[in-house]
Image (spheres, rainbow, N blue to C red):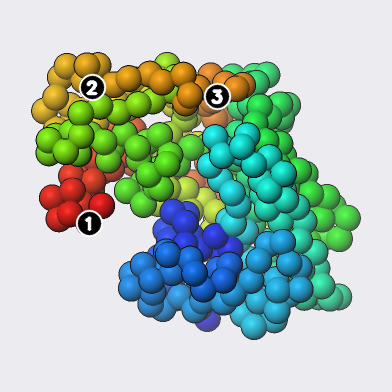
Amino acid sequence: MKRALITGVTGQDGYYLSKLLLSKGYDVFGLVRGQNNPKIEFLRRELPEVKILTGDLMDTSSLVRALNASDPDEFYNLGAISFVAYSWENASLTSDVTGKGVLNALEATRIHVGDDIAKVRFYQASSSEMFGKVQHVPQSETTLLWPRSPYGVAKVFGHYMTINYRESYGMHASSGILFNHESPMRGPEFVTRKISLAVARIAAGLQDKISLGNIEAKRDWGFAGDYVDAMWRMLQQDEADDYVVSTNETHSVREFLEIAFDRVGISDWESYVYQDPQFFRPAEVDLLIGDATKAKRQLGWEPKVDFPTLVTLMVDADVERVRNKSV
């Protein structure tokens, strides 16, 4: 039985990755920061097989203890402060957790494995936000990184540190440059889930409007359940490497709104949407679209859930939650 340690296990990706690994017969350990995380109870209820360990990405010694306790074959570092808008308000904390936290995880792994450098395979959750002011469309593994948020800058640091540990110490350390991936498990602070939840509430007569930023911004949106499969495939390769994971399509926030409102039978959706200047980014990323050719060729990976289906899944889930008064 293989063993895996996951940081950020209470997040969207941690949930789907845990489900995937458990289905493959893994012994799964999830790292959480302290016992007051409100999502722990959900994890215990939904995935009781996951063994919970405590630790902190800012504390290397706690990561070493978690590695010693779990003795994993694979270490998936998904933990981060991942809400981009928050990173402008708390740039220093974001840099520490999302950037330096990667260094701590890599160093803890190096300490844990000692001379047996191949003992643990490491996955780093990189991000399409690293491309920022895009220098090439679509973006691939060789596209120049030009981040436009503190979050993106922190992710670039973690990405290059992962490459550095791979090249300096021979670690099997791979980075997945994941483009936007969503699901019904997405936090309500993210624009996609903010929309799906608002649409469900508007349809139920519980909300009048939704306030958003730039609805013309375009993203390459996929399903988180598909993307965690790409993470796993990376760590099954003989050689570590970096891979763009995307749908190779781009859609605007406007398109997301149209499909979401149509799902609940509302055609005049624009009257329900208010573009609020406070939600516009200080430095906007207007167009992100990935080129996942390498992942398709080398990993045999392709997304299964298309954009309309993704939006429908999210709206249906929130309609059900509103009906059951569980949100």
Sequence-wise, the earlier of marks 1 and 2 is 2
Q: Is 144 left or right of 291, judged from the image as shown?
A: right
Kind of residue indicated by mark 2? Tyr
Q: Is residue 304 visible in this depiction of the protein?
A: no
Q: Which of the marked residues, 3 or 1, is nearer the chain's N terminus?
A: 3
Q: Amino acid at mark 3?
A: Arg
Q: Which residue is mark 1?
A: 326
Q: Which residue is mark 2?
A: 272
Q: Residue at x 62, y 59 (%)?
A: 77
**Tag 3's secondary structure?**
loop
Determine which residue is flagged by label 3.
281
Left or right, residue 254 beside residue 36: left
- The span from disc 3 to disc 2 (Cα, nearest Å) is 22 Å
**How far across and how far down the image is residue 11, in percent?**
47, 56
* Quarter assignment of residue 199: top left
Q: Secondary structure at mark 2?
A: helix
Task: Identify the residue shown where x is 28% and y is 32%.
Answer: 308
**Residue neighbourhood size for the residue with mark 1, other residues' Cα within 10 Å, grouped as few (<14), some (14–19), many (≥20):** few
- Rendered location of residue 292, percent (x, y): 55, 35
Q: Bin the neighbour count of mark 2 within 10 Å (Cα to Cα): few under 14, some 14-19, many 20 and up.
A: some
Question: Dividing the picture into quarters, in which one does residue 258 lie?
Answer: top left
What's under tag 1, amino acid-wise?
A: Ser
* Residue 252 horizontal side relative to residue 2, left or right: left
Asked whether the beta carbons under mark 1 and mark 2 sit within 8 Å of each other, the answer is: no
